[in-house]
Amino acid sequence: MPAATESILVRGVNWLGDAVMSTPALIRLRQGRPEARLTLLSPEKLAGLWHRQPFVDEVLTFSSAENIWQVGRRLRERKFTVGVALPNSIRSAMELWLAGIPNRIGVARPGGSLLLTQTVPPRAGAVEMRKRTVGDIRRRIESKGETTFYPAAAHHVHHYLHLAAALGASPEAMPPRIDVSEGEMEEVRGKFGLLRAMGRPWFGLCPAAEYGPAKRWPAERFVEAARTLQEKTQCRWLVFGGAGDRVLAETIASDIARATGEAPLNLAGQTGLREFAAMLKICDLVLTNDTGPMHLAAAVGAPVTAIFGSTSPELTGPFFSPRAQVLRGRAPCAPCFRRECPIDMRCLRGVQTEQVVAAALRCLAGNAHR
């Protein structure tokens, strides 16, 4: 049994989707070290994600304005006994070193391993997401090959579990989880006027993707899918996005209003991260690209229909959720992992509106008990 004085610092990841995928590792670590104090170091922008999550005792944050030396000084005062670097980066290893943590654990990598006291060999079956070159993409198109598929064991959830296992935690996979309370859901229902449409299902739409346009299904197809689904289910639409997605969200919301005669509630840039999680949990269905909100929606328990283009659902899809349907366009060059497509977006354009509508209806049918 670990001593009660054991104090573990987990250096969290930097992006929403990755943070959600790391929750099984944090939960397993909590289970494996029930007597330890577990602290998570997180970018300030993700602080709301960890609010009242039972698997961490404390969350420390750092801002983009702080340099690594400032962060290290703050951490050194806490006298942590163990540090785990979830990101495979030199900066994360250096933060643990600057914090003076005697036991520092991370994945072995050139340069960064010198700052760790325990290196974990790369997991068997791991796949690195390398961007395909333009030349490789064109060669694959000309050869008329097949879409690349990866084994289920390559999913990134297993990467974080592999690190937690170095501390004796179980590496057994489980669905990512973010807890949202009924009180939080009631609060956002009141704030955004959702109580006025009780009795009709709420569907969420996440048409953006911060990574780049190669992950964004065409806007006009989102509009057509929204129109068809509203005809079939009498749903109301919520359009989600960040502050930088306001123009896209407004365009799609306006087009849906014209197509259906009923304006969606456009919430792009209007919610904090915690409010966003509560709004997603309220949804009876979330239609989304492969993006951070996709992971968050699945983790709070919403039924999800997700569309993949330049990325791989085997590596980052919501496959651990029983409430998810995943679609991908078949193309010889997919997945290319590029932010922008150098040819014709054939992977995304290969996903037809009818396929998405059918997947969404299957998603609903499988969750009729909600």
Image: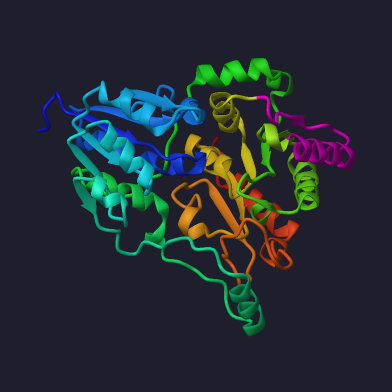
Residue 358, compared with residue 343, is above or below; it is: above
Residue 278, compared with residue 247, is above or below; it is: above
Query: The magenta stretch spans which residues?
Result: 246-270
* Principal secondary structure, stretch drawn in magenta: helix
**Residue 367 makes an appearance in the image:** no
**Residue 305 makes an appearance in the image:** yes
Q: How many marks overall? A: 0
Q: Quadrant of residue 76?
A: top left
Say which residue appears at 68% left-offset and 53% top-offset: 213
Say which residue appears at 57% left-offset and 72% top-offset: 147
Q: Position of residue 256 (x, y in %)?
A: 83, 40
Left or right of 340: which side holds 54? left
Left or right of 152: which side holds 115? left
Q: Where is residue 237 in the image (x, y as percent from the top left)?
A: 73, 35
Q: Position of residue 149 (x, y in %)?
A: 49, 68
The quadrant of the picture occupied by the N terminus is top left
Is residue 256 within the magenta segment?
Answer: yes
32 vs 244, nearest the viewer: 244
Q: Where is residue 276 in the image (x, y as percent from the top left)?
A: 59, 29
Say which residue appears at 55% left-offset and 28% top-offset: 273
128 vs 306, nearest the viewer: 128
